[in-house]
């Protein structure tokens, strides 16, 4: 049953407001996806060598990581709509900085600011879904939200290629991102405000005034806590929920790490076994297409059977896929196995769509989720940011196949952590 078929009036209202709920994030993701592949080009035009260009591009991930906690603070105090509008404005200024950057420092700062804005957009909608979407179809709604970002990362590079073919200028992708931002902010400010029109969903036990202690043990649904007292901020929220964050949050960070490693390992693996650029792009593209095709299936599984039934297969597929790939590097059929395990990793990543968003929503206090979600997203983004560094360091000390195998071990350990800590239906 979809939200449109739901007898719940909140579900029907969410379906009618879907363009307002998902539209801004789709626009932001499309623009970001078009700009991201060209960031090293902008850096090289300013005189950067390859390592420096990679460092400039990574400023976006660092900005998103650093922006989660401030975004949680902002959403909790000024609301989702205002936070998204301010984030869009900051991103517009950053796009101008990317286009007219006189040196690498200004370019890196502009890319960092785009990361901050991405954190605001992502957290605002995450908080909205946490408080407004009924538990019966929460995972599907959040999988769709995750799918909007996947759509941007999947379609954006193709749009960038088309823009380069027409204008022959990488700055065209930045201006395209700026147009997407103008449209997104206009939609946020002038369209119907879902935050006002959709009432917050009361947490289970609200009628009786029951609350649950934060023990860090597996729970069903949101962790219930008293309504936030004045003066309670991000740091106190992190301390109050330290057990959940240090257990389920670390398991979620391991999933984020394995996901991020896939984006690094696959293209580098293709280069290391001697494939040409066209073949590598084809294999990585097919893996991404499989990933994108499965994003809604993950939500269906989580809503119907429970969160673990999506989290566990996803982690096992990616863990085993990395381990198996690591022993094929010097074989006679290395190229064939590269294609096979790239597809396996794509299936695993697709099945994990929306899991981090859904588990964060389940664990967040229903009355005031933004500060908690800022901490949660910081943990998961940290896992994604550390993974490429871990792969690089392990490859430098040992070898690239060993680094790939290490990510497989992390995937299997993460699967065990999910078995222990994921809430049961």
Image: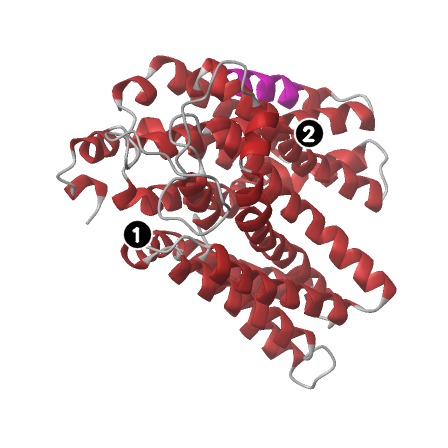
Q: Secondary structure at mark 2?
A: helix
Dot label at residue 335:
none
* 89 is within the stretch colored magenta: yes
Q: In the image, what residue occupies the spot 75% across and 55% down?
A: 390
**Residue that mark 1 sits on:** 303
| Mark earlier in primary sequence (1, 2) | 2
| Viewer-closest of 58 and 391 | 391
Left or right of residue 254: residue 300: left
Stretch of the chain drawn in magenta: 85-96
Give the x, y percent position of residue 268. Answer: 71, 61
* 276 is within the stretch colored magenta: no
Q: Secondary structure at mark 1?
A: helix
Give the x, y percent position of residue 250. Answer: 59, 50
- Colour theme: secondary structure
Q: Quadrant of residue 213?
A: top left
- Crowding near the residue tagged with mark 1, few <14, some 14–19, many ≥20 C-alpha atoms within 10 Å: many
Could one spot residue 302 in this view of the protein? yes
- 414, above or below 256, in the image: below
- Crowding near the residue tagged with mark 2, few <14, some 14–19, many ≥20 C-alpha atoms within 10 Å: many
- 181, above or below 82, in the image: below
Q: In the image, what residue occupies the spot 53% across and 37% down?
A: 241
Give the x, y percent position of residue 50. Answer: 82, 46
- 83, above or below 253, in the image: above
Give the x, y percent position of residue 204. Answer: 28, 37
Q: In the image, what residue occupies the spot 41% across and 45% down?
A: 358
Q: Disc 1 versus disc 2: distance between alpha carbons?
A: 37 Å
Q: Quadrant of residue 117?
A: top right
**Residue that mark 2 sits on:** 111
Left or right of residue 369: residue 59: right
| Viewer-closest of 168 and 333 | 333
Query: In this view, which residue lies farthest toward the left?
Result: 7
């Amino acid at each position: 049953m979809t939200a449109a078929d739901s007898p719940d009036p909140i579900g029907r209202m969410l379906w009618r407001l879907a363009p307002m709920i998902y539209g801004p994030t789709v626009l932001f993701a499309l623009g970001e996806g078009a700009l991201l592949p060209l960031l090293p080009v902008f850096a090289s035009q300013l005189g950067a060598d390859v390592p420096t260009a990679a460092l400039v591009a990574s400023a976006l991930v660092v900005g998103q990581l650093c922006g989660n906690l401030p975004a949680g603070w902002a959403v909790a105090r000024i609301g989702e709509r205002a936070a998204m509008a301010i984030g869009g404005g900051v991103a517009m200024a950053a796009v101008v900085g990317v286009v007219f950057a006189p040196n690498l420092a200004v370019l890196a700062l502009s890319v960092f600011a785009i990361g901050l804005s991405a954190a605001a957009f992502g957290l605002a909608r995450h908080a909205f879904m946490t408080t407004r979407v009924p538990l019966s179809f929460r995972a599907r709604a959040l999988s769709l939200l995750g799918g909007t970002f996947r759509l941007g990362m999947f379609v954006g590079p193709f749009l960038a290629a088309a823009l380069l073919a027409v204008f022959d200028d990488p700055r065209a992708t930045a201006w395209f991102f700026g147009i997407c931002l103008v449209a997104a902010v206009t939609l946020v400010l002038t369209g119907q405000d879902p935050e006002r029109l959709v009432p917050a969903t009361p947490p289970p036990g609200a009628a009786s005034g029951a609350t649950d202690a934060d023990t860090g043990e597996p729970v069903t649904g949101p962790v219930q806590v008293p309504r936030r007292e004045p003066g309670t901020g991000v740091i106190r929220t992190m301390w109050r929920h330290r057990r959940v964050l240090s257990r389920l949050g670390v398991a979620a960070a391991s999933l984020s790490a394995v996901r991020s490693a896939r984006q690094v390992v696959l293209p580098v693996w293709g280069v290391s076994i001697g494939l040409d650029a066209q073949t590598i792009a084809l294999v990585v593209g097919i893996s991404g297409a499989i990933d994108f095709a499965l994003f809604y299936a993950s939500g269906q599984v989580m809503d119907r059977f429970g969160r673990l039934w999506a989290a566990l297969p996803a982690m096992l597929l990616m863990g085993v896929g990395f381990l198996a790939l690591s022993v094929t590097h010097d074989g006679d059929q290395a190229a064939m196995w590269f294609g096979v395990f790239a597809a396996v990793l794509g299936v695993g990543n697709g099945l994990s769509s929306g899991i981090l968003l859904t588990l964060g929503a389940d664990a967040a206090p229903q009355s005031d989720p933004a500060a908690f979600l800022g901490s949660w997203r910081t943990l998961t983004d940290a896992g994604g940011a550390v993974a490429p560094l871990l792969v690089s360091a392990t490859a430098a000390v040992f070898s690239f196949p060993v680094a790939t195998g290490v990510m497989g071990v992390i995937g299997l350990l993460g699967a065990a952590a999910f078995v222990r800590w994921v809430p049961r239906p």
